[in-house]
Image: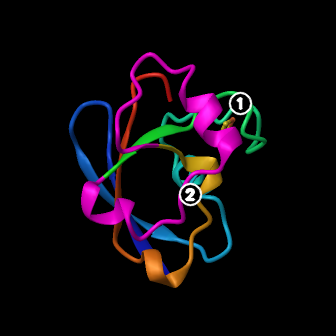
Amino acid sequence: MGVIHIKDHHGGLHKIEAIEGWRVMEIIRGHGFAIKGLCGGACACATCHVYVEPLWSEKIHPARDDEEAMLDEVPTVADNSRLSCQIIYTPELDGLTVELADAA
Ligand code: FES
């Protein structure tokens, strides 16, 4: 068990428990945050868009082509954008910090 830090749409910072093997999108949603995750993690909607704190970007596996292609469709994409359904939580990500994007 570890934690993820979430910056919400209003700038609030929250520490939530993470579960190994779960998608970060599922963990965030499971704690009641307003993240849609409409496609359920199929990399087909981008409603799980988050901004990863730059310190953590290099610790997460790079985005695959299908994730990059989906992010390219997002108007608010940034260098540190990721689809949180494509990040599987592992103990190495204990302390991960992400900010919920507006469309998430
Ligand atoms: S939940 Fe649809 S792309 Fe992540």
Relative horizontal placement of residue 44, taking residue 25 as reference (left or right) = right
Compare marks 2 and 1 and give the one earlier in the sequence. Answer: 2
Tell me the crowding category of disc 2: few under 14, some 14 to 19, or many 20 or more residues within 10 angstroms, Cα based.
many
- The picture quadrant where one finds residue 69 is top right
- Residue 41 drawn in magenta: no
**Label 2 to label 1, Cα distance in Å?**
14 Å
Ligand 1 lies in which image quarter?
top right
Q: Which residues are magenta?
A: 53-81
Q: Residue at x 27, y 55 (%)?
A: 54
Tell me the crowding category of disc 1: few under 14, some 14 to 19, or many 20 or more residues within 10 angstroms, Cα based.
some
Is residue 13 positioned above or below 58 on the image? above
CB at mark 1 closer than 8 A to ligand 1?
yes
Foreground residue, 30 or 71? 71
The image position of residue 24, as x and y in percent, is 56, 57
Residue 63 in view, yes or no: yes
Three-letter amino acid code at disc 1?
A: Leu
Is residue 20 positioned above or below 16 on the image? below
- Residue underneath mark 1: 38
